[in-house]
Amino acid sequence: MRFSGTESYVATPDLTAAVNAAVVLERPLLVKGEPGTGKTVLAEEIAKGLNAQLIVWNIKSTTKAQQGLYEYDAVSRLRDSQLGDPKVSDIANYIRRGKLWEAFTAPERPVLLIDEIDKADIEFPNDLLTELDRMEFHVYETGETVKAVRRPIVIITSNNEKELPDAFLRRCFFHYITFPDAETLQRIVDVHYPGIKHRLVEEALRTFLAMREVPGLKKKPSTSELLDWLKLLVSEDIAPETLREQDGRKLIPPLHGALLKNEQDVSLFEKLAFMMRREQRGG
């Protein structure tokens, strides 16, 4: 069982090596990188490439580790007891299985994605240490122990919003997805938009990479935003020459709302355009 990328996902050699190392070691693969570099999609493509079920646990700021195991709905049981419902005699009727339980009991080895773990409370990763190590947990209400039938392939993503505990990091295989170079970006574009005009892509990539190099950007445009932008450029039939124009009026590219996602960055480009116009008049 080895991952080598898929037709719809361009995986660099170091990324495929990291995925396969985590599979061999049977350790969670912790994936970090800029937002929009394909961390979440990676888990989807691993599942596709290995023909495995994908189980997704989306983490929020309010998520607790216990929710990944199970939750006991005591309120519903109390209400049913007041109504005389006979199912209250079996407490198992009020146990809601979490994503880890689902992954542990899957008939075939699944891929479990724990997405954006850094959004949760700082104690969240530590609260999962034992379960991820032993691949089992105890259900106190029923007295049963849930043990993984087959150890799932665990992919954990983080946007570095919080530092993760050392004890948690020791149990993971780590990979940082670096931002793609121009050649890799071209391959990604070719996968998503085969047959797109070469000159348009060439000019779009040049503009996109130049924008990422502008000092002071609060949020650099990402790979996913590049793909959105290209889709709009094609839809609006924007000519490659339009992107090549670099006078003060054209410094901000057309349809830039797909790339610049806050007013500070738009303002930064407007200031740069103003400075360029002033320099041109002075010349």
Image: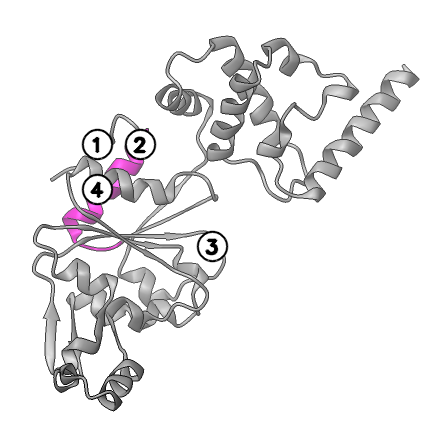
Element class at badge 1: loop
Q: Is residue 3 left or right of residue 242?
A: left
User: Pointers 4 and 1 in contact (CB under 8 A)?
Assistant: no
Which mark sits nearer the N-terminus, 4 or 1?
A: 1
Q: Is residue 52 above or below residue 69?
A: above
Element class at badge 2: loop
Q: What is the CA distance from the residue labelled 2 to the residue labelled 1? A: 7 Å
- Per the image, the residue denoted by label 4 is 47
Name the residue type under label 3.
Asn
Question: Residue 46 location in percent, x, y?
Answer: 23, 40
Number of disc labels: 4
Name the residue type under label 4.
Ala
- Per the image, the residue denoted by label 2 is 11
Q: What is the CA distance from the residue labelled 2 to the residue labelled 4? A: 14 Å
Q: What is the CA distance from the residue labelled 3 to the residue labelled 4? A: 24 Å
Which mark sits nearer the N-terminus, 3 or 2?
A: 2
Name the residue type under label 1.
Ser
Residue found at the very far front of the displayed protein:
83
